[in-house]
Amino acid sequence: MERDRIIVVKIGGVALGSNDTTVEDIVSLQQQGKQLVVVHGGGKLITSWLKIHGVATRFVDGQRVTDRNSLDVAVAVLAGLVNKEIVAAINQLGGRATGISGADGSLVQCRIEDEKLGYVGRVVRVNTELLDTLLQAGQVPVISPLGIYAFDRPEDAPHILNINGDIFAGEIAAAIEAEQLVFLTDVPGICDRSGNLLPRLSAREAEELVVSGIASGGMIPKIRGCIRVVNIASITCIIDGRQPHALRQQIEGRGGGTTIYKD
C-alpha cells in the first residue's frame, strides 16, 4: 500500500510515569492526522521482575544477556504488562491504539544476534503487512520488541527472541521508510566527554563517539538505531523524554536533544 510518511517513536520507562506527557502527545499528534508507530522498551521493569525471581541481570554493549529464564520474564513483561499499559493509556485518552509484538503477523523474523547474548535476536526480515493494515485502519501500532526465531533455530530452542528495543525501532523505521525516528530517553541527548550536550552529529561523528567509548551503555543501540535509518528518514533524534511534551515539541520543530544527520 501507499503510505503517508510515518513517525516512529521509541519510548522507554520515561513514558510510564504518572507525570509523563508522552501518551498525551501521541494522542494529540494522532488527532492532528499524524501517522505514528510506537516501539516501547521495558528494561527497568524486566530487571525488577528478574530480581523478584532471583535471576541475575547482565549487559554487554548496552544489550541484555537473555537466558531461558530471562526470556520468559522479558516476554511476559514486554508483550503483556508494558504493552497493554501503554495501549490502555492511549485509548483512555481518546486515541486509537492496538498493541502487538514483533512475533504477531510474523512482523519481525530473526536469528541469534550473538551467542554470548543468549536468546537475543538480530532482525533479518520485517514483514510490514500487519503494520500497513493497522495504520490504514487509523490505529497507532504499539509494538513490543520481540521477534520470531525464524532462521537457524535448533529444535529445542524457543520460538521467540528478545530484541533490543532501540535496534528494533531502527529496523521498523527502515522497513516502513519512516519520515522521522524519535528516541525518548532519560538523558538530555548525546553528550561529549565533558558532559556537554551535542545538538547535531553526522552519522560518522556519532559512530566515532561509540568507537571511542564516549557514548557507552544504553546509548550505543540508540545511536546505531539512528544510523540504521539516517539515509531514509528526514529526522533521527535522541531527546529527553522527561521534559513536558518533549515529543510534541520535537514534531513541531521545537525539540532539543541530539539530531543525527546523513554524512
Image (cartoon, helix red, strand yellow):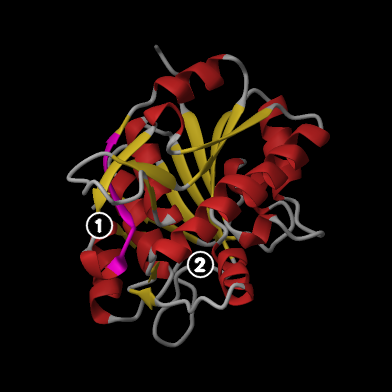
**Residue visible at 57% across and 52% down in the picture:** 76
Q: Secondary structure at mark 2?
A: loop
Image x and y of residue 128, in percent: 38, 25
Image x and y of residue 168, in percent: 39, 48
Image x and y of residue 86, in percent: 69, 44
**Residue visible at 49% across and 57% down in the picture:** 72
Side (left or right) of 192 relative to 135: left
Q: Is-magenta flag for residue 122?
A: yes
Viewer-side residue, 89 vs 159: 159
Q: Is-magenta flag for residue 148?
A: no
Return the mark for residue 45. Answer: none
As displayed, is residue 201 above or below residue 22?
Answer: below
Q: Tell which residue pokes out farthest to the front in this image.
A: 156
Image x and y of residue 50, in percent: 56, 71
The magenta stretch spans which residues? 117-125
Which quadrant holds residue 231?
top left
Which residue in the structure is indicated by mark 1? 113
Q: Label 2: how many residues lie within 10 Å, few (<14), some (14-19) or many (20+)?
A: many
**Residue visible at 63% across and 61% down in the picture:** 13
**What is the three-letter code of the residue carrying label 2?**
Gly
Which quadrant holds residue 216?
bottom left
Which mark is in front, 1 or 2?
A: 1
Q: Secondary structure at mark 1?
A: loop
Viewer-side residue, 150 vs 2: 150
As displayed, is residue 60 above or below residue 33?
Answer: below
Which residue in the structure is indicated by mark 2? 189
**Residue visible at 73% across and 34% down in the picture:** 28
Side (left or right) of 180 relative to 152: right
As displayed, is residue 168 above or below residue 234?
Answer: below
